[in-house]
Structure formats: structure tokens, C-alpha cells
Amino acid sequence: MRYGVGVDFGTSNSTAAVYDGDRVLLIPLEGDDPIMPSATYIDRDLQTLTGQAAIDRYIQDNTGRTVEMIPEVIGETSAFVEHGDSENPAPVETVTKKIYGLPLTDSGLQGRLFRGTKRLLGDPRVRRLMVFGHPFRLVALITPLLLRIRKALEGQVGGFSEAHLGHPVNFEGRDSLRNTTALQRLAEAYRYAGIRAPHFYPEPIAAAVSYLTANPGVSGRYLLTLDFGGGTLDFCVLQRDGTRFDVVTTYGIALGGDHIDQQLFRVLLFPLLGQGEYWRRRGMDREIETRFPFEDYEALLLNWAVTYTLNQNRYTTPVMERLAQGGPGAEKFQRLNELIQRNLSYVVFQAIKDFKAELSYAERAVLDIPDIDVEITLTRDEFEKIIGDQLGEVAEALDMTLQRAGLAASEIDIVLRTGGSSLIPAVRGLLEARFPTQVVDHDPFTSVAAGLAIANYQGLTFGVQPAERG
């Protein structure tokens, strides 16, 4: 039996599917679940874990661990030292001294976690990342995930050598050649993973293909897709003619659900962790009171994969000093200390994701994080005000898509929303304000993989495929 194969390697999660001309089969990647976290963990022996196991191992290895940063040896100098004198000569000794750089090496680190690597693919400056003294190309960090997906596919349909592979309309970055660079790197990684003939296909178009295949009787000439995932926001406009279609335009920006999660963390939790509080320091001749330097912690708190690096003396000592001073705000620094010492950042972000998902169907939700004694009740209206800037970016990108298509909102017949972040009611409200009767939903987490499998089966193509490097 002939199958079409599709792989959606995402910023946050990955999925895969096959299509036999009649039915789409989603491939189990995490137990029975077709959705697998796009995560890779490499330990000191350079052994690799992928998916949820990678995240679990990262948490296990770093919970409660004190980080000790030691200087990196960047060179050596040698000198001759004479111990004797002219009357009592002695052998000349060669003394070698090491030259140390900045304290960049985490001596107790058990492994490196890589998640969101897709965001780096379009940056030509990021070529290799050091992992325990070994330079790893970005391609090598992605390949284990793709290899796992390929093996899962083979378990369902046997061997295959080609597949349709999803990609965002625009990869993150500012380099003018970021899309070309990213696709070349992805193509190389897929080939190392055993997919010898990768065919790249834009993710929003794949979602539209999936919807049209599942709804063959739907009418309308123009279809617009909004694909709002973990890392990017993508659009496409198709012009239909029966069962055929032409792509009118595509458009995409670097905005995703991860950005919204970080905004919620910033607004809701920073003030509960010590932002804006004061502390007392001993000056030259008196004690002075200044704001606590919370800005030194912000970037690491917002990136859960590296938050564990806060558990080193230069970060923990100020927190403990402020705790010892007591008074107003002390409980906030107790939370910050708990989060750092117990490496709870991943737990916090998972709670934020669940909280955000609940607000997709409830008018009110509670952000409950007992590990750091946080319980915040928020209405959907309050949530939408917090993410107002991000919603504004969605509206601007939608307007730009229509402008590039040369179409008015009234000319669009079907508006398809997909991707996990498209479930936010404010996003649907934004669409319905422009397209009152045209908005439909379609498999927010798996539509792209399904559409890629169908496109592969039907031999659909779009754009120029990256050339294979020799």
C-alpha cells in the first residue's frame, strides 16, 4: 500500500502522520500520544534522550543542585625559573601557568537540555554549540528527534525514504537569508535521520490541505489560514477552483504561545518574586536602601531551560541577604529562593500553560502553584489586557496578509484557525470581528502533520526546495 508521510517538527512540540488516500493516521510518538515535546538532552557521556524523557531527566539532574561556575582554561604560559645562584647552581625549572577566562563552565552540570532549537536555525552566526567541550552543530542537536520520529513512522508503515516536512513561512531572525539557511540545515538533519528525499511545505498551507480533504463539500473561493503555534504565527491565502487551489500569498512573524507564557510570567509573577522591592546595603559610612537588582534575574527566569543557572552564589547570596532583613516583601524572596533552589521554573511554566488553556473555555481561572505559595485568580478580560500587545501584533499581521493578497476581508469565504494559541478566545474574537461568519476550527495540534501527509501523497509542491550540499 502506498502512503503519504508528513512530519511537523515544531518549536515546542512535534507530530507525524501518514495518509493512504482515504484516511489519516497520526503516529504515536510519546506512548499513545501523537504529540512529542521537541526536546533533546545530552549527558556528560554524550548519550542522548529526546521528548518528555529529555525534560524529565533535565529536571531530575538539576532539582536542588547548587551551580558552581568555574573559570574556563583558555591557554597556558611557560617560563624558566632558576633556583640557584652563581656560586650554587641548580637545575633550571620550567613553570607552566594556566590562563583563565571568565567563569563560564558549570562544573556540576550533568547534561544539556535543548528545546526551541528550531528558533536558531535561521541564524547563520549560530553554527555550533559547545556540549561538555565538544562542538555540536545545530543539525546534530535536531537529528536525534527526527530519527525517533522516523523510527516511529517505520513502525507503522515500514521503510520510506521521502516525506513532506513542515516549515514556518518565516523562520525567526533578521538575516535576509534566514529561510534559506534554516531549510538547508533542516534538510541535512532529515537526511542524517534517514529521510533521504525531504520535501518542504509551508505549515499554514498544510493545515488548509488537511481541512479541505476532511471537508470536501465545503464551498467558497478564498480560504485564509491562521496557524498560531508555540514559536511562530503564520498565514496563507488560497484561491480554490473545485478540488484544486493556488496559493495567493503567505506571511509569518515570530510570535507564538511561548511569548504569551513569558508575558504572563512577567506580569503576574515578577511582582510576587521581588520585583520592585527594596533592600539595605552597607555603604562607606552608613547603611543605604536601594531597589533589589531583580533585573539581573529576569532573563533567566523567563527561560526555564536555563533557570537552574540562578542557583549559584552571585544570585543566591543577594536573595538570602534580603531574606535575612525580613520586613515587607520578605515572603516574595522566599518564593524566589524556593524557585531557584528547587529548580521549579518548568513546573511554573507548565502551570501557566494550563492556566492559559483553562481561560480558553472559562471566564475565570486560578493560577495555582503551591510549590511557591502562589494562587492568582484572573478573569478572561484581565488576561486579554495583559496580552494586549501580542494581540495587536496578531491584528497587524492579519492586515498585512490581506494587503499582500490584495483582498478585502469581505472577499474571504473561509477563515481557518489552527495551532494551540489560536484557541485563545481573543484570537477568535479578533477574527470574527473581521470575518463574522467565516471562521472555522480544525485540529489545532495535528492539522499540519495531517496536511503534510496528504500533500506528500498527492505530490503537492510549493516554493524552491533547498539544494543538497555536497
Image: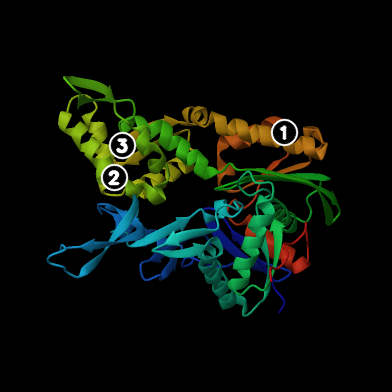
175 displayed left or right of 316:
right
Q: Which mark is residue 215?
A: none
What is the quadrant of the N terminus in the image? bottom right
Identity of the residue furthest to the left in this view: 88
What amino acid type is highlighted by mark number 1? Answer: Asp
Q: Residues within 10 Å of mark 3 (few under 14, many from 20)?
A: some
104 displayed left or right of 383:
left
Res 53 quadrant in image: bottom left
- Sequence order check: which comes first, mark 1 or mark 3? 3
273 displayed left or right of 261:
left
What amino acid type is highlighted by mark number 2? Answer: Ile
What is the quadrant of the C terminus in the image? bottom right
Residue indicated by mark 1: 399
Q: Give the spatial CA distance, label 1 vs label 3.
A: 39 Å
- At mark 1, the secondary structure is helix
Residue indicated by mark 3: 374
**Numbered disc in front, either 3 or 2:** 2
Q: Are marks 1 and 3 in contact (CB under 8 Å)?
A: no
Confirm whether residue 33 shows in the render. no
Q: Position of residue 413 (x, y in %)?
A: 79, 41
Q: Position of residue 316 (x, y in %)?
A: 25, 41
Q: Which mark is residue 340?
A: 2
Q: Give the spatial CA distance, label 1 vs label 2.
A: 42 Å
Q: Position of residue 46 (x, y in %)?
A: 40, 70
Instruction: Say which residue appears at 24% left-offset and 44% top-offset.
Output: 313
